[in-house]
């Protein structure tokens, strides 16, 4: 892992972590609906769950999809169904005016488990291992890739939650918060388009 390759990988990790996707849309909504402190378990679940995925892919899990391509289709549709379920939950989220309503932020375990059915997370993990992990000294390199990805990913997703907190102070009316939640739910459903269109090729 040369310094130039490490810098290139860090750029990849930043771009893929900061750009919109299911995780960022959900923590944005969580920041608005529940505040930053209550979103922390969600953030940690994403970060550590994704880091475990990168390490697992590096240690050979990615080869399972090569050996059994049907698993890719199974993952695609399971992930799509779960994203629709999460979109429904966001759409039905209460507002800050509701106080301790029935809705709750995603837990650490739920967020960590979600990474394994998140199509964007798989693309990020496989891309990191296949493109930026030299074969010479592979085990040490995959540890470096995992740690660097975690260090970059954490602040990126936290920034989205922080933006949600800012919106929480702006969207003070119940109606505007409900519109925001519906918009986030719609964006989550729209994020399925690449998955479904790819399956039709």
Image (cartoon, helix red, strand yellow):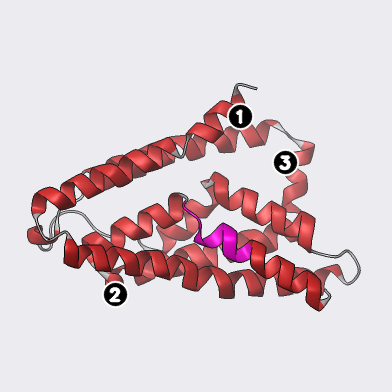
The residue drawn where x is 23% and y is 49% is 180
The residues bearing labels 3 and 2 have C-alpha atoms spaced at a distance of 37 Å
The residues bearing labels 3 and 1 have C-alpha atoms spaced at a distance of 16 Å
Q: Residues within 10 Å of mark 3 (few under 14, many from 20)?
A: some
Q: Is 17 part of what is drawn in magenta?
A: yes
Q: Magenta stretch mostly in which secondary structure? A: helix
Q: Which dot, 3 or 2, sits closer to the camera?
A: 2
Secondary structure category for the residue under label 2: helix
- Residue 89 visible? The answer is no
Judging by the rendered image, the residue that carries numbered circle 3 is 65
Judging by the rendered image, the residue that carries numbered circle 1 is 198
The residues bearing labels 2 and 1 have C-alpha atoms spaced at a distance of 37 Å
Residue that extends furthest to the right in the rendered view of this protein:
136
Q: Residues within 10 Å of mark 1 (few under 14, many from 20)?
A: few
Mark 2 or 1, nearer chain start: 2
- Residue 87 visible? The answer is yes
Mark 3 or 2, nearer chain start: 2
Residue that extends furthest to the top in the rendered view of this protein:
200
Q: Nearer the viewer, residue 119 or 58?
A: 119
Q: Nearer the viewer, residue 177 or 111?
A: 177
Task: Using the image, determine if residue 173 lies above or below residue 71.
Answer: below
Judging by the rendered image, the residue that carries numbered circle 2 is 37
Residue 166 locus on image (x, y percent):
26, 68
Secondary structure category for the residue under label 3: helix
Figure quadrant of the N terminus: bottom right
Figure quadrant of the C terminus: top right
Q: Which residues are magenta?
A: 13-20
Task: Using the image, determine if residue 51 lies above or below residue 37.
Answer: above
Residue 137 locus on image (x, y percent):
88, 72
Q: Quadrant of residue 59?
A: bottom right
Secondary structure category for the residue under label 1: helix
Asked whether disc 2 touches disc 1, contact meaning CB atoms under 8 Å apart, the reply is no
């Amino acid at each position: 892992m040369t310094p130039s390759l490490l810098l290139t990988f860090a750029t990849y990790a930043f771009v893929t972590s900061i750009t919109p996707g299911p995780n960022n849309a959900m923590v944005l909504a969580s920041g608005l609906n529940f505040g930053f402190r209550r979103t922390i378990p969600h953030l940690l679940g994403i970060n550590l769950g994704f880091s475990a995925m990168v390490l697992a892919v590096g240690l050979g899990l990615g080869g399972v999809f090569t050996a059994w391509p049907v698993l890719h289709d199974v993952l695609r549709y399971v992930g799509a169904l779960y994203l629709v379920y999460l979109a429904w939950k966001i759409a039905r989220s209460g507002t800050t005016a509701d106080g301790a309503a029935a809705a709750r932020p995603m837990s650490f375990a739920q967020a960590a488990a979600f990474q394994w059915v998140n199509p964007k997370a798989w693309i990020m993990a496989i891309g990191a291992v296949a493109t930026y992990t030299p074969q010479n000294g592979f085990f040490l390199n995959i540890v470096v890739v995992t740690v660097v990805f975690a260090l970059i990913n954490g602040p990126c997703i936290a920034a989205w939650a922080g933006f949600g907190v800012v919106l929480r102070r702006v969207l003070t009316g119940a109606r505007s918060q409900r519109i925001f939640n519906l918009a986030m739910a719609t964006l989550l459903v729209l994020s399925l388009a690449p998955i479904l269109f790819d399956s039709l090729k």
